[in-house]
Image (cartoon, rainbow, N blue to C red):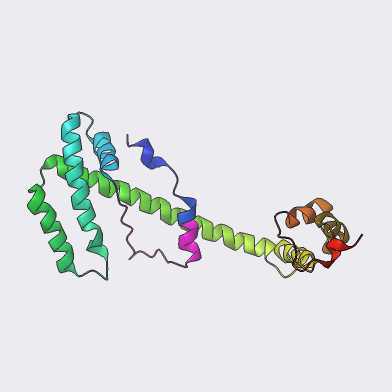
Amino acid sequence: MGNPKYRQPVDRSLVKGIRDLGIQLTSDVYIHTAFDDDEAADLLRSLAPDLPPSQVEDMSKKAARIWAALESASSTSVPLAETLENIGAVLADDGLPDAPVILGLYALARASSLQEAKLRKAVSALSVANKGAEGKHGKPNGSWAKKKQIQDSWATGNFRTRGLCAEVEYEALGVTYDTARSWLKGMPDPSPWPARLRR
């Protein structure tokens, strides 16, 4: 069963950001996924399809408020007293949770745990892939170094066109003309660009 909405892959930019920032997802790091009321209702509905829609809406909103209050429970920077105060405030407004609200909390915790597992796996896979790419392309005379070399040549301003730069440089780099030309695509015009005025 389960909600197909939460089977989607993890946002790649989030994964890349975590890796690029050097954040370590060790076993003592907990990722708390926030859910809005609609997402909470979808999750509760997927676990309890027989509940009346009005009850699902009401119970999922209560569960989402408790879940949001629990966000700071695993934080090392938020005092436990503050977390308990936040949870107490929600319970004072909504009353003690009944079985459907607890089921809603379970649905949110489960979905958050699944998202965390996907995120951990994606960050790990990206790190492994990047290490492999660095090993293959990042060697002193690897493709990244060659690409930088031709881009540096273009940036000197000594070539009238990117095509001419690629034509002159590709053999020395040991790549095809098409590869050399593709490495220059999107490169800004050199400044200064003395060769531009030459005929």
Foreground pick, 24 / 5? 5
Q: In the rendered image, which quarter is residue 175 located in?
A: bottom right
Residue 150 point in image, percent of width and height = 78, 64
- Report the number of discs: 0
Check the image and report above or below for 174 versus 115.
Answer: below
Position of residue 164 measured from the top left corner of the image (x, y, whole percent): 86, 57
Identify the residue shown where x is 49% and y is 52%. Answer: 12
- Residue 2 sits inside the magenta stretch: no
Task: Specify whether 69 is left or right of 93.
Answer: right
Q: Where are the magenta residues, as a range?
A: 15-34
Left or right of 117: which side holds 135?
right
Q: Is residue 159 visible?
A: no
Residue 125 drawn at (x, y percent)? 51, 55
Quarter of the figure with residue 83: bottom left
Horizontal side, residue 118 vs residue 161: left or right? left
- Considering every residue shown, the one lying at the far front of the view is 197
> Residue 64, can we see it?
yes
Q: Residue at x 42, y 56 (%)?
A: 120
Above or below residue 129? Residue 96 is above
Is 20 included in the stretch rendered in magenta?
A: yes
Q: Please determine whether, in this image, residue 197 is positioned above or below residue 110.
A: below
Nearer the observer, 25 or 171: 171
Quarter location, residue 187: bottom right
In the picture as drawn, the residue positioned furthest to the right comes out as 199
